[in-house]
Amino acid sequence: MDFREVQRLVADDMEGVNAVIRRYLHSDIALINQIINYIISSGGKRMRPLLALLCARACGYEGDKHLLVAAITEFIHTATLLHDDVVDNSSMRRGQETANLIWGNESSILVGDFIFSRSFEMMVEVGTMRVMEILAHASNTIAEGEVMQLMNSHDPDSTEEHYMLVIQSKTAKLFEAACQLGAVLSGQPQKVEEACTKYGMHIGTAFQLKDDVLDYQSSPEEMGKNLGEDLTEGRPTLPLIHALRKSNKDKAELIRDAIIHGGKRHMREVMAAIHDTGAIAHTLETARKHARSARLHLEMLPDNEYRSALEGLTEFAISRTS
């Protein structure tokens, strides 16, 4: 099942999620509405709400609280994007200028806070303590991941193991929570809940690793952000960590300098080192391993079209071009 087929399968549910998003993101304050409308109109794959919907349906859920839960995951994700762009001083996302570039850092941070706090109001409305527990824990873990990434910036001694911990905290945790919530709402036994949780962690990790690859492969138009942004920010992602480990002394020193100082002055040489050391292939194979692990955990779920869609997403996560 390709990505468009997956989207069509839950199109009615996703329309319900969009209605929830529009309802809960409204504010009487004009600036909040301006920034939120700008972000919503910029698109995005809505992967986290999509996973929440699919896992709920795959587990046989027939209520409507999955719409609220799916919207909450998108709210948390959107709030972190607003904050990330300020921290990273980003100027492009999804092919458009970032909110902080247009409205300034202060406005972006405060609107991010508004979206994040609104998500907690929505958690209360779900009315299930277990749902609140999962989302509160996920939010805390994501914040820790953001801090770990900040500490890793400009650090050429960052290891592959530590980087994997960062992305599993910063990115994969919300994928994990979205999938786990689908099982929780459905009242599934512990073994099914754990399978959904692990599926989410693995597909989220694969998704981020593919993003790392695209930062060094895609054009800005395909990726929707500045090419080589990770290197510019001195952020040692897996391709860079692998290239540094496998390069000879001279090239390794050049990569270390690029990480420490950031910028694009060594971009051509670093890109060559990434190519020569097989860093892209290594990162893609690591992503494939996580995608395979994600598919294996789906064997615990009922065999239905929603499970097939979840299987299809594991392939999409590693084969997409943007």
Image: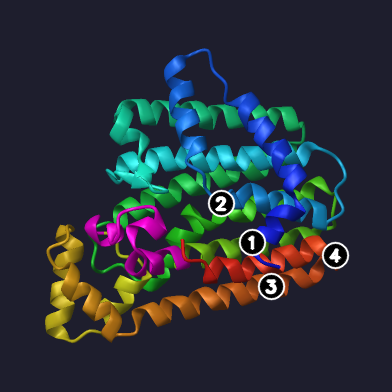
Query: Residue 3, labelled with which disc?
Result: 1
Question: Which mark sits nearer the N-terminus, 4 or 1?
Answer: 1
Give the Cα distance between marks 3 and 2.
20 Å
Q: Nearer the viewer, mark 4 or mark 1?
A: 1
Position of residue 242 measured from the top left corner of the image (x, y, whole percent):
33, 78
Question: Which mark sits nearer the N-terminus, 4 or 3?
Answer: 3
Residue, x 76% and y 55% (percent of image)? Answer: 9
Residue 276 in the figure: left or right of residue 282: left
Please name the amino acid that badge 2 sits on: Lys
Give the Cα distance between marks 4 and 2.
23 Å
Q: Nearer the viewer, mark 3 or mark 2?
A: 2
Question: Which mark sits nearer the N-terminus, 3 or 1?
Answer: 1
| Residue 228 is one of the magenta-drawn residues | yes
Place residue 212 in its image quadrant.
Answer: bottom left
Place residue 270 in its image quadrant.
Answer: bottom left
Tag 4 residue: 304
